[in-house]
Image (spheres, rainbow, N blue to C red):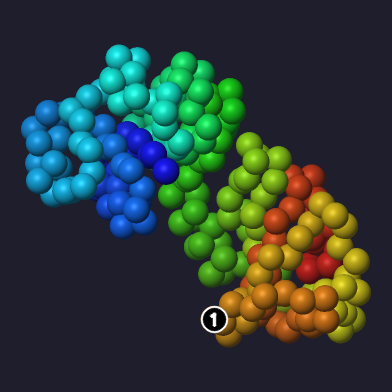
Amino acid sequence: MRVVVAGGGSVGTAISLDLLDRHHDVTLLEHVSATAEKLRLLLPGVNVMAADACEYASLSAADLRSVDVVIAATGDDEDNLVISWLSKQEFGVPRVIARINNSRNEWLFNDTWGVDISVSTPALITSLVDEAVEVGSIINLMDLAHGRMRLIEVTLAASAPAIVKDLTLDELRLPDTVRVVAVVRSDQPMVPSPTMRFVEHDHVILIAREDAANECSVAFIG
């Protein structure tokens, strides 16, 4: 798979190395020439280009029309939006992934700007902090499908209906808009089955439609 990573900072460098280890064809765009020269020595096997990924000419030189994935991983949200928009609108890249540096800008990272998947490190860390202190609350881990679906987590309290009524996953009768994809119990991941029963402090990971929070609450919060 051909992947172009925009941004030669610590994030872009780490992504490029990981992708190379997975045998992908990786091109890294870094606008500072001196930094790009250093990265060529640090990243053998990665095609490092000294180029501004916010410019059409740079993306054209990287042959973006033949690329499968673009990752906008700079430390500037405005740059990542411009890179995403150009990649999708001007070059028709099938999948565009963008890094969000400031969670206040998260609302901008959608298909209007050409973003297929956005990754917000601040929001993810905040979610993990919430997870550590909130039992019996729905924690949003990640938005999927341009915000139409959500990956969420609920840490079950003893009063959760699924526990109080001793219901199996099948007996909960969750709607098609909600799917339990994993359960973490005592730090051990478990694959959910129709006969699974829940216990206090289970971490239930679900994929749910954006408007299905009430269905999750009825089963796991009460």
Q: Is residue 204 above or below residue 55?
A: below
Quadrant holding the N terminus:
top left
Mark 1 lies on a secondary structure that is loop
Left or right of residue 64, residue 211 in this image: right
**Residue labelled with disc 1:** 187
Crowdedness near tag 1: few (<14), some (14–19) or many (≥20) residues, C-alpha within 10 Å? few
Q: Quadrant of residue 154?
A: bottom right
Q: Is residue 91 visible?
A: yes
Count of numbered tags: 1
Viewer can see residue 11: no
Image x and y of residue 151, in percent = 64, 55
Q: Quadrant of the C terminus?
A: bottom right
Does residue 47 appear to the left or right of 192 in the view shown?
A: left
> Which residue is at 59% across, 28% downward?
111
Observer-nearest of 107 and 58: 58
Residue 157 position in % (x across, y down): 72, 76
Asked if residue 211 is positioned above or below residue 127 in the image, the reply reads above
Q: Residue at x 63, y 45 (%)?
A: 144
Q: Residue at x 45, y 37 (%)?
A: 69
Q: Nearer the viewer, residue 70 or 22?
A: 22
Give the residue displayed 78% in from the left and 67% down from the top: 221
Vertical position of residue 154 compared to residue 60: above or below: below
* Amino acid residing under circle 1: Asp
Estimate the x, y position of residue 209 in percent, counting from the top left: 76, 48
Q: Is residue 97 above or below residue 66?
A: below
Q: Is residue 37 left or right of residue 49?
A: left
